[in-house]
């Protein structure tokens, strides 16, 4: 875990090279992070989510080094900006709803919802009629999310609901993906990997970092690995939790939750700006 200005050494050779490239050439770097569980702690009520203290300042320092900074999230872009205060980071790009939306310099680009979403919205009332107490539906306009975290047994509630939700989504031309006590129904072909790849291409980034915590972040890890195979340096960072093991297994750097992520970003910002930062 990072503490203060310690910058951990990645556990893979590719990660070591990726982090070194980012530190050596900030102007060619893209630092992208997930929101919930990575930049902001997971909470029972998503409306009360806030960025871990120090997170905005850490991203701002990285941006001032010359690097580009992005948040790639399943949240609606404007919601992530509002809850996180992300507008305070100069030039930040926020890709919301897995890249379907884009917020930059106060301007939002968002598509129309797919027609099948209305049928799913209606069908969920039947699916949820006998759901465990505490399960609820979050409507994000372009997608729908069923949350089971408030249930007495959130794992059991998720296992019971997930197949029925997946069937409903498939019948209406949509996809259902499970995460940390959630099932999200969204348009097919949209994920954080595609969003990250497009942004790397747009910015012509020579090195990329992506930090995430959940299985929905693994497509972005895939893209970092693919880009490394094509000559673009990269490093993946996991915000570790007891709820998801698969992300930590894939990451070059593993830190302790959102506090660890912010400590890592603070140390990275110091290193990129030429200040002393210990690598261990």
Image (cartoon, grey):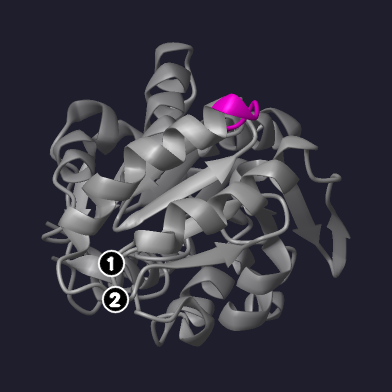
Residue that badge 2 annotates: 150
In this view, 27 is above or below 60: above
Q: Secondary structure at mark 1?
A: loop
Q: Secondary structure at mark 2?
A: loop
Left or right, 15 with reference to 58: left
Gap in Å between the C-alphas at discs 2 and 1?
10 Å
In this figure, what is the number of numbered marks?
2
Name the residue: 29% across, 76% down: 150
Q: Quadrant of residue 138?
A: bottom right
Residue that badge 1 annotates: 132
- Of residues 208 and 142, the one nearer the viewer is 142
- Of residues 256 and 215, the one nearer the viewer is 215
| Magenta residues, start to end | 171-175
Mark 2 or mark 1, whichever is nearer to me? 1
Q: What kind of secondary structure does the magenta stretch mostly adopt?
A: loop
Name the residue: 75% across, 33% down: 202
For label 1, the crowd category at 10 Å Cα-Cα, with few meaning under 14, some 14 to 19 and many 20 or more, is some
The disc, 2 or 1, on the residue closer to the chain's N-terminal end is: 1
Left or right, 157 with reference to 117: left
For label 2, the crowd category at 10 Å Cα-Cα, with few meaning under 14, some 14 to 19 and many 20 or more, is some
Q: Quadrant of residue 74?
A: bottom right
Residue 234 visible here:
no
């Amino acid at each position: 875990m990072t503490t203060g200005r310690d910058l951990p050494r990645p556990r893979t050779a590719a990660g070591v090279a990726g982090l070194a490239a980012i530190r050596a050439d900030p102007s060619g770097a893209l630092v992208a992070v997930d929101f919930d569980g990575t930049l902001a702690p997971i909470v029972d009520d998503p409306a009360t989510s806030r960025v871990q203290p120090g997170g905005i300042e850490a991203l701002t320092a990285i941006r001032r080094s010359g690097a580009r900074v992005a948040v790639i999230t399943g949240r609606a872009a404007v919601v992530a900006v509002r809850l996180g205060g992300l507008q305070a980071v100069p030039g930040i790009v926020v890709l919301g709803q897995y890249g379907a939306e884009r917020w930059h310099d106060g301007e939002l680009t968002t598509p129309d919802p797919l027609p099948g979403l209305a049928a799913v919205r209606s069908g969920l009332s039947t699916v949820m009629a006998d759901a465990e107490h505490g399960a609820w539906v979050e409507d994000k306009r372009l997608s729908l999310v069923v949350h089971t975290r408030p249930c007495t047994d959130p794992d059991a509630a998720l296992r019971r609901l997930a197949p029925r939700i997946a069937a409903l989504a498939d019948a209406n031309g949509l996809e259902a993906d499970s995460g940390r006590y959630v099932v999200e129904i969204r348009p097919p072909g949209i994920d954080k990997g595609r969003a990250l790849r497009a942004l790397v291409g747009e910015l012509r980034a020579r090195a990329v970092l992506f930090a995430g915590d959940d299985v929905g972040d693994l497509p972005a890890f895939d893209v970092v690995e693919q880009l490394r195979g094509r000559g673009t340096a990269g490093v993946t960072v996991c915000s570790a939790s007891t709820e998801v093991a698969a992300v930590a297994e894939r990451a070059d750097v593993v830190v302790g939750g959102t506090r660890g992520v912010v400590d890592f970003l603070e140390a990275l910002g110091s290193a990129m700006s030429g200040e002393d930062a210990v690598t261990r």
